[in-house]
Image (cartoon, rainbow, N blue to C red):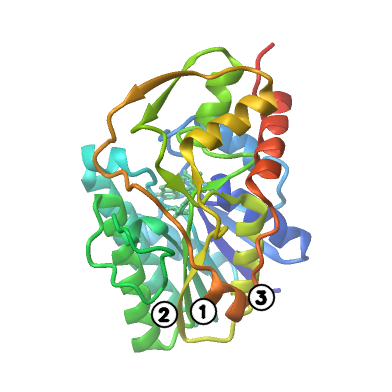
Amino acid sequence: MSAILVTGAAGFVGSRASKELVRQGHSVVGVDNFNDYYNPEFKEQNIKDVKVRLYREDIRNFAGLQKIFSENKIDKIVHLAAMVGVRPSIQNPFIYEEVNVRGTLNLLELARHNKIKKFVFASSSSVYGNRDKVPFSEDDITNSPISPYAATKKAGELLCCTYSSLYRIPSVCLRLFTVYGPCGRSDMAPYKFVDSIANGRQIEMYGDGSTRRDYTFIADVVSGIMKSMDLDAQYEIINLGCGNPVELREFIGIIEKNLGKKAKIVKEKMQPGDVKQTYADISKAKKLLGYSPKTKVEEGLRILCEWYMENRFKR
Ligand SMILES: NC(=O)c1ccc[n+]([C@@H]2O[C@H](COP(=O)([O-])OP(=O)(O)OC[C@H]3O[C@@H](n4cnc5c(N)ncnc54)[C@H](O)[C@@H]3O)[C@@H](O)[C@H]2O)c1
């Protein structure tokens, strides 16, 4: 039976997508290097009950990836492995380029040589940079990313475009918008806020709280990824957001309500690389994928807080 290769399989999105693929009856091969960008123990927990054939490999290692392809009959790739995070990419751009650009190129080369039927790539809303015009549409010009991370995601999209055109590899680049939910990344604001408020620690709020993010619940993102695997298209860029931006202040307020605790907020300056707002135009995803995000932020944060209290809170 053909298998689907999921890179970054132990990560937040990768583990949830792998779980859903397995649930749908697919055979899944996972690749992850379990790096310590955030606690690798969390990655072990994410993937431990998911029945994938797991390789602890680095996507920068072309020979290592070749071996995985020789040992498995892979016909689709969901490429989620990446160095993530905007601010750290400013401190250490080289590893972002190595993993996100070279690693993506490695996978596209293998897609080419193994006649892959679908290449799904996780891009990011960050490619839109800082802009006032909302919502962000796939047709907008994205030539001004404001962090190395965003620039490497744009580079990944361009490489997918090139490989799709040269070798007819059907490719979909999904621009994900601030994903949150159970198994969420411990370096991201939603998890950090829940963690700190639950434990009575201070939270840092960058800016005056009026920045807006189009927070997207993990189950909705996973449904978009699943639908994109069946899309009959040569090359498409598609936003996967919620289409409903929420101010940071309000976001924190919903967490406070769910945890029954007040946040101790320390105001900090906006950080380099941070954009003022994200807001996805999801009409293309609706039209091409039949994507329809179901989870409002109140509900999504309730689920995140419950999961956190059960799985991560130390009494
Ligand atoms: N979570 C979000 O809000 C969000 C938003 C936009 C885009 N994305 C993109 O979605 C994808 C998944 O993000 P996530 O939030 O699940 O992040 P994550 O860090 O939880 O998952 C990425 C996984 O890739 C693995 N990885 C990193 N470098 C690797 C390498 N060299 N070789 C093999 N594995 C490696 C990591 O160990 C990690 O498990 C990423 O490509 C990210 O850029 C995520």
Residue 254, above or below 220: above
Name which quarter of the figure residue 3 lies in. bottom right
Residue that appears at 57% across and 39% down:
184
Residue at numbered disc 1: 116
Residue 26, above or below 208: below
* Residue 255 in the image, given as x and y percentages of width and height: 61, 30
Which amino acid is tagged 3? Answer: Gly
Residue 146, above or below 270: below
Q: CA distance from mark 3 to mark 1?
A: 24 Å
Q: CA distance from mark 2 to mark 3?
A: 28 Å
- Taking depth in this image into account, of 261 and 52 the one nearest to the observer is 261
Which element type, helix, strand or loop, lies under badge 2?
A: helix
Which amino acid is tagged 1? Answer: Ile
Residue that appears at 31% across and 64% down:
154
Q: CA distance from mark 1 to mark 2?
A: 7 Å
* Residue 289 in the image, given as x and y percentages of width and height: 62, 76
Residue at numbered disc 2: 112
Which element type, helix, strand or loop, lies under badge 1?
A: loop
Which element type, helix, strand or loop, lies under badge 3?
A: loop
Name which quarter of the figure residue 4 lies in. bottom right
Which amino acid is tagged 2? Answer: Arg
The quadrant of the image that shows the C terminus is top right
Residue at numbered disc 3: 290
The quadrant of the image that shows the N terminus is bottom right
